[in-house]
Amino acid sequence: MSEAGGADGPLPDLFARLIANTGPISLQYYMGEANARYYASRDPLGAAGDFVTAPEISQMFGELVGLWLTDLWARAGRIAPVHYVELGPGRGTLARDALAAARQHGLVPRVHFIEGSAALKPLQLAAVPEAEWHHALSSVPRNGPILLVANEFLDALPIRQLVMTPQGWRERMVGLEDGRLVPVAGTQPMDAAVPEAQRDAPEGAIVETCPAAAATVYEVAGRMVKQGGAAQYVDYAHAEPRFGSTFQAVRAHAMVDPFATPGEADLTAHVDFATLARVAQSRGAACCGVTTQGDWLRALGIDLRAQALSKAAPDQAEAIETARTRLVEPAQMGALFKVMGLTAPNWPEAAGF
Ligand code: SAH
């Protein structure tokens, strides 16, 4: 069996057979299946993988996330039991660093990982041996506040796109052309699915939504309203909704055609935090704001933390400064990545926004 081969053979062949038999498939289905196969079969992180995330760049990222949660929990009255919940924890690095920082200030929560990848599970167990695994939030206990973290999780959830054609709005699908997977417009009229304010768009305009992201944020907000707690989401994002596709693929640290190698590249789309904040508020949660990763890390004291780490390990000072720069500088990760904070409605005001 090749690396790309699952039980049903390589995914591009599977898609091609499906499309040949039943017609184009939705982009949402394509992305969901491709990422499920991609994450189930490998550890995509690090220099030898496809991409590097903030917690893998420096321990400072996870530590500041941990301190943000601890500060809120402490000011809310140090309620116990309390649950640390992470969506898509990758190698478990963020959780390990966040929990170490939290422990120093008296926060020792139960730890819950929500993860779909069997390949990443052993790495997560090595990083945080006490963690409990879940396939979904529904099995996480309902007693006590939840402190939830999700870094580069929402961007991997399947998106839906609608495209303006000469015949009106259509869903963006994936079809076959000369044996290759290509984006095509569906045949069903989809005008009713486009908000009225956006309906009069020029030909070629694309409206992108992520129903799965809205669904998970809605569920998390509901949990926080009932149990108390706070949530922090970090992802690639634009500040306001706009027209256009942000669907992309990354493989071996380079952008590739998202239709060329499904199951072998990380498929992502920018996260629409403005919409997700409204979704959370509609369930009764409070949004602390949406800011850039650079501003948020600076407000939480990354500069002081970098100084302290460098003082403790002078031979590492250059590497620490390189990591700090990578996380906060606007030309690097500082501006493209955004942070959204949510809290239970009666919880204290969050730091950093
Ligand atoms: N948060 C980590 C990893 C980011 S990669 C970090 O910052 O390093 C995306 C993570 O989300 C992986 O752990 C992947 O397995 C998980 N994931 C992606 N789609 C998922 C889904 N539909 N359900 C559950 N986990 C998912």
Image (cartoon, grey):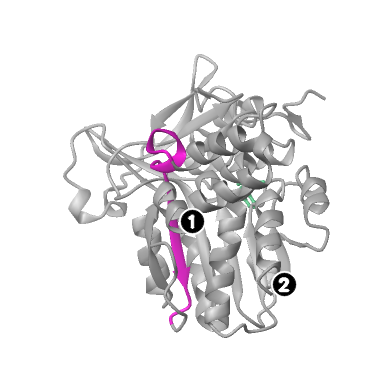
Q: Quadrant of the C terminus?
A: bottom left
Is 272 on the left or on the right of 74, as rendered?
left
In what element is the residue under mark 1?
loop
Q: Nearer the viewer, residue 242 or 170?
A: 242
Identified at 60% across, 62% down, the residue is 66
Tell me where residue 40 sits by quadrant.
top right
Q: Nearer the viewer, residue 161 or 142?
A: 142
The picture places residue 136, in percent across and down from the top left corner, at 66, 62
Q: For disc 1, does the CB lie below 8 Å from ligand 1? A: no
* Residue 343 included in the magenta stretch of the image: yes
Chain part drawn in magenta: 329-345
Tell me where residue 67 sits by quadrant.
bottom right
Query: Taking 204 as reference, is 36 above or below it?
Result: below
Tell me where residue 19 sits by quadrant.
top right
Q: Kindly identify which residue carries mark 1.
A: 301
User: Residue lying furthest top in this view?
Assistant: 178
Q: Residues within 10 Å of mark 2 (few under 14, many from 20)?
A: some
Residue 108: assigned label:
2
